[in-house]
Image (cartoon, helix red, strand yellow):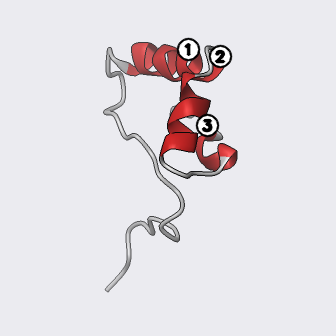
Amino acid sequence: LQVPYNYGDGETYGIYLRKGNDNREALVKAIETLQTNGEMKTLLQKWNLPETATDVKHTTD
């Protein structure tokens, strides 16, 4: 028996899209907008999350 993937420690989250998904660029832009206009910080404070909770890595793997 092999484990194909480990989802981490419960503190790591991701948004998974199929390769070539047309919504990827819109999603990346939406996240960047939330970060630059301050709304992301407001949401993090509302839900008592650390500011590092939205350190985003954009990958295409």
Cβ atoms under marks 2 and 1 closer than 8 Å: yes
Mark 3 = which residue?
56
Examine the image and state in which quarter residue 18 appears.
Answer: top left
> Picture coordinates of residue 49 (x, y %)?
57, 51
Three-letter amino acid code at the position of disc 2: Thr
Q: CA distance from mark 3 to mark 2?
A: 13 Å
Query: Looking at the image, is 46 positioned above or below residue 38?
Result: below
Sequence-earlier tag: 1 or 3:
1
Q: Residues within 10 Å of mark 3 (few under 14, many from 20)?
A: few
Residue occupying the point 53% across, 57% down: 12
Whether residue 8 is visible? yes
- Camera-nearest residue between 39 and 26: 39
Examine the image and state in which quarter residue 44 appears.
Answer: top right
Q: CA distance from mark 2 to mark 1?
A: 5 Å
Mark 2 = which residue?
36
> Picture coordinates of residue 8 (x, y %)?
51, 67
Residue occupying the point 48% across, 48% down: 47
Dot 2: what SS?
helix
In front: label 1 or label 3: 1
Whether residue 61 is visible? no
Residue occupying the point 45% across, 69% down: 6
Q: Quadrant of the N terminus?
A: bottom left
- Camera-nearest residue between 2 and 24: 24
Residue occupying the point 32% across, 14% down: 22
In front: label 3 or label 2: 2
Sequence-earlier tag: 3 or 2:
2
Mark 1 = which residue?
33
Q: CA distance from mark 1 to mark 3?
A: 13 Å
Three-letter amino acid code at the position of disc 3: Val
Query: Looking at the image, is 48 positioned above or below residue 30?
Result: below
Three-letter amino acid code at the position of disc 1: Thr
| Circle on res. 54 | none
